Amino acid sequence: MGRLFAIEIIYRGIFQKTLAKNISRAIVLAAHAEGKPGISFGRYGDSPERNGIPAKNFAIVATDDQTLEEGMAKYEPKEVDVTIAVDDTLCKGVESWAWYGLQPVNKLLKPGGALIVTSREQLQTLIEMAHRKEHPYQLAIVKGTVSFSGLWVYKDDHTDVRILGTIARLLPDLFSLESVQKVIMGEWKDPVKTASAAKAYERTTTTTVLPDQGNPETPYKFDLPKWHEMGDGIAIPSIPAGHSIEDPATHAIGGFRPDRNPTFKKFTTRTMRPVVNFDTCIKCTLCWLQCPDSCFDVTPDELYDANMQACCGCGVCEAVCPVKDCVTMVNEAEFRDNSSQWEMWKNDKPGYEKWLKEKIAVHPERSHGFRYRGQYEEQIPEMLEVAREG
Amino acid sequence: MATMATEVQEKHQTDETALITGSEAIAVACKLADVDVITAYPIRPYDTVMQYVAKLVANGELDCEYIVAEGEHSQFEIVKHASACGARVFCGSSGVGWMYAMEALTVTPALRIPMVAMVGNRALDDPGAFGVEHNDALTVRDLGWTLVWVDSAQEALDTALIAYRVSEDRRVFLPCAISCDGAFLTHSQALVKIPSQEKVDEFLPRYNRADLLLHPDNPITVAPQGNEDWVMEIRRQNFAAMERVPGILREAYADFERIFGRPYPNPFFEEYQTEDADIVLMGMGTLSTPVKVAIREMRQKGKKVGFVRMRWFRPFAAEELAKTLSRFAAVGVIDRDYSFGSPYLGGVLTGEVRNALYPSPGRKPPVLGFICGLGGREVTVPDVQRMSESVYQAAKGKSVPLTQWIGLRE
């Protein structure tokens, strides 16, 4: 019986589609260079992709054809040797748009398997973001600015080959650095990229994450109904309209919070979140009107509180807000929970003001942000510089 | 136009290996077959083919008329007319897109148009779903289309070349639908051997519409109105064309093996570990993978299970299949489709298998039907083991339900 290797690439829909595909193709080709057969595929249920929604690609490789067939007999692998998260905020959890529910980023990792994350954050930050795992696993950071691009444009910042170099180091039985470099020359014909892969290979270090480290929350669990328990005619009950909410300081009742799906959330799509300055808000209603996900709760004092169970982090609220610095998009990695900003402000206004200042100081570009030809080429030197610093 | 294109073709002496999806394999076959007119209209999972074809055209690798139609009905009508004018054509769709083209699909075989189409199998709405079910392609099973299921990207490429050869044979002139399971085949990249252009040219002659060419130099009227004085004879002609297909298919597969060196011992169905099998399972498409893996596991525990994978559903090799199945104590047919209210409430393939066995002079093993893997649900190895258990019970003469739903939440 041969050996089966499974690798998943978790990525942000559209923004990182080409990146994930390049990585998973190159994994199969590098293994093929060593005589191992393999297949590469995207998780069908994740598609058609939506901007930023977590999605998965898989590479399945085996030492022989019959073992590969065993890997292919499953729709998607039940466990993997390596999980690659090409955006660090994915460490908070992965919920595709296809009703799988929120899943920990490390859910499929085998005992001792490796989680590779592209990030500029510290190890400890990423460890805390990811859900706890019943067995230890390895964590490796590929240091660099997270690579986002569009469906028709690709930011060739070497993230792809740096990850391939890292895999060669962590899973040498799968393929060697030489095989990776051979594939890079075949696919991209760029010796600089082979050098990037080698550098990533040399610099790879891992940390063991123990079962008592990480986010202790249990992700949403649910059971699907039996066929005879479901209603006829493909009709499903609606979510009720909504209800008023209570002011934590004054106990006034008022406002409106739409009821939301208790099981399926959307917030793992978010790579940045709006932070609201309630003191400067002029109650113009624009954020509430324009939010494509109806994520704003109306408070009893007629303010608008972005509900973090529903916010996808699109940034429309920041764009439409007429008041300077009233709504600011902040890197999602800066936050540990989804609690209400308005409640925090109500309970402790000076504390909130201090917190707000700290947060809006962190304001990186997180979207694909493609506005003109040549823009990515301008950004790449900076990204490579971060990569070079290690 | 066709003869010009062959003059500038690339010369490759040996097969290349490429990491491509089943859809991409079909697009590569279009390139190798030097197709003249291709129409497209997006629907998942078929749209991956049109994307790859568009890429080949944009990169200058394929010289064809590439038309994005305003809907599936026009999409299939355009290639129908182009084919009547002597163009080699390619088309395709999925699920409800295929259904929307249905009026065009019905007239195509009657006019003896050798269109090759790819059906990326997809569940029919409602509910809106993308996963594989075979009911879409099966809707043309009575109309004069030849209909084939493939289970790998390599087989998709090979079968597309064979489909052109057989469909465009003057003795046939019937359209062919190549069914590829959505997701499992259309979206999964595997290592595929791409044959050289020389080999393809040797295997596949140019399409010659001959006496049926719609051209001012060959004045003919195609498809005038016909009443009860004419229709039955016209149907009988289609019947005769379909009757000729098995022999021509055999010729094509023999030639394919001679030229490409890749054998398909029996074009109509693949037998897996049937030599010493007590019972067999049957099915179509990519469910062959979990079935084969399950069979290997069961054989380690001494259970001699085999598998018969139907490739060609039309024409249906009834006599040959009945002869093969007579060797086994019982048969379990896995349907990735449904036929509500059918005899014994089974799926489409189950009914066809029972039908094939009834007039057979040989032994008639009991046939169980399993409905499984609908809407893209995974057919698992334990599912296959459960089905085999039932078939063993039937083989022992025990009373077992004739139709079972497997992998259902019940």
Image (cartoon, coloured by chain):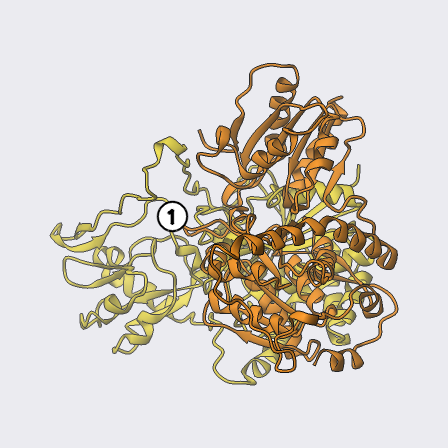
Label 1 environment density (alpha carbons within 10 Å; few <14, some 14–19, many ≥20): many
Horizontal and vertical percent for residue B376? 53, 45
Q: Which residue is mark 1?
A: A264
Q: Which of the two residues, B104 or A111, is positioned nearer the viewer here?
A: B104
- The residue located at (80%, 81%) in the rendering is B7
Q: Is residue A125 visible?
A: no
Q: Is residue B283 visible?
A: yes
Q: Which of the two residues, B34 or B324, is positioned nearer the viewer here?
A: B324
Horizontal and vertical percent for residue A327? 30, 70
Helix, strand or loop status at disc 1? loop
Horizontal and vertical percent for residue B272? 76, 36
- The residue located at (58%, 63%) in the rendering is B111
Residue A166 is drawn in which quadrant? bottom right
Q: With B147 as the anchor, is A212 left or right in this view?
A: left
Q: Which of the two residues, A165 or B136, is positioned nearer the viewer here?
A: B136
- Look at label 1 and name its amino acid: Phe
Q: Image quadrant for the C terminus of chain A?
A: bottom right
Residue B82 position (above or below residue B131)? below
Q: With A380 as the anchor, is B248 left or right in this view?
A: right
Residue A79 is drawn in which quadrant? top right
Q: Image quadrant for the N terminus of chain A?
A: top right
Residue A162 position (above or below residue B176)? below
Chain in orange, by letter, is B
Chain at tag 1: A
Residue B154 is drawn in which quadrant? bottom right
Horizontal and vertical percent for residue B374? 51, 41
- The residue located at (61%, 82%) in the rendering is B216
The hue of chain A in the figure is yellow
